[in-house]
Amino acid sequence: MAVFEFEDLTVSWEHRMFGGNQAEKGESVGLLLLWDRGTFHMGWQQGAVFYPIGGRKEPVKFPPRLNKPDDQNIKELWRDFLQAIQSGKRPVSDVEDVCNSTNISLLGMLSYKLGRGIRWDGDRGVILNDPEANQLLQRKYRSPWIYPEVT
């Protein structure tokens, strides 16, 4: 379990499987968002479902939008990427967004490994006031490879 405190939002992330709730039945891949109105399960091959709290209302289903023959959306992502290059706009799957979302899970694991909370400075890419934690942000490469440095 990890708690991320942002300026305007607190997020609790729990990595688990088979929690016994209705949203996990049928597809174990995806993301669960739980809040006071119900549970939203964003799946992959089966789409998404919102389960209203209390079980009195029917779940709201959102079918998947996947392409045959491989049930992926790779062609659309490449098309969007090329359009972003031409237009100068950010693509749907922007590298900065992907980097930030990846950092969140990696920092949660680093905090778990250390057994304590950490404070991340995303602009500078460092953990504040924690030299031990900063040492874990990169590993020594095998020779002749070197860790790239921005100059």
Image (spheres, rainbow, N blue to C red):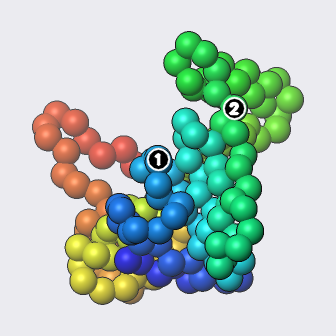
Q: In this rendering, would 112 be left or right of 22?
A: left
Give the amino acid type for the residue marked by disc 1 in the picture.
Glu
Number of marks drawn: 2
**Residue sitting nearer the eye, 50 or 106:** 50
Image quarter hosting the N terminus: bottom left
The residue located at (47%, 48%) in the rendering is 26
Whether residue 124 is visible here, answered yes or no, is: no
Residue drawn at 47 percent across, 81 percent down: 3
- Residue 27's disc number: 1
Which residue appears at 51% of the width and 64% of the height? Answer: 22
**Amino acid beneath label 2:** Arg
Q: Residues within 10 Å of mark 2 (few under 14, many from 20)?
A: few
SS label for mark 1: loop
Q: Position of residue 140 (x, y in %)?
A: 19, 52
**Badge 2 is on which residue?**
65
Q: Residue furthest front?
A: 56
Q: Residue 68: give x, y in percent of width and height.
A: 60, 16
How far separated are the C-alphas under marks 1 and 2?
16 Å
Between 51 and 65, the one lying in front of the other is 51
